[in-house]
Amino acid sequence: MPDKDLPLELKRGLGKAANLRNRHEQDAYAAAIKAYYRYANKLKQAARMLSGLNPAERDLIIAKVIMKHSVSEAINNKEAYRR
């Protein structure tokens, strides 16, 4: 969730090529794109480190990374997260 509202010009710019139908879609799309860019590097790093895990374990660790844990911390503590 963004710390503050995104400027209208940014929302319009991000959603221009997406053929959005209304402001709600424009807001949701802009927020999703902004969140992706915020976490993209961390998620790519996690994906490289987690290639050998099953999808459920990988998803659990990625969720922890999104919740502001480091990739290493999430991997090292994956057993504790199952409880």
Image (cartoon, rainbow, N blue to C red):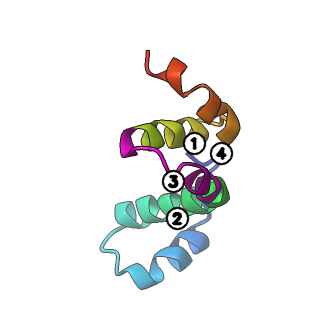
Tell me the quadrant of the picture where the C terminus can be found.
top left
The amino acid type of the residue labelled 2 equals Ile
Which residue position holds label 2? 33
Which residue position holds label 4? 3
As measured in the structure, the alpha-carbon distance from the residue carrying label 2 to the one carrying label 3 is 24 Å
Which residue position holds label 3? 51
The amino acid type of the residue labelled 1 equals Ile
Question: x, y (%) of residue 36?
Answer: 55, 60
Tell me the quadrant of the picture where the N terminus can be found.
top right
What secondary structure is the magenta-colored segment mainly?
A: helix
Mark found first going from the N terminus, 1 or 3: 3
Which residue position holds label 1? 66
Residues tagged 2 and 3 counted as in contact (Cβ below 8 A)? no
Report the mark closest to the observer, 2 or 4. 2
Mark found first going from the N terminus, 2 or 4: 4
As measured in the structure, the alpha-carbon distance from the residue carrying label 2 to the one carrying label 1 is 15 Å
As measured in the structure, the alpha-carbon distance from the residue carrying label 1 to the one carrying label 3 is 18 Å
Between 72 and 36, the one nearer to me in the picture: 72
Mark found first going from the N terminus, 3 or 4: 4
Mark found first going from the N terminus, 2 or 3: 2
As measured in the structure, the alpha-carbon distance from the residue carrying label 2 to the one carrying label 4 is 15 Å
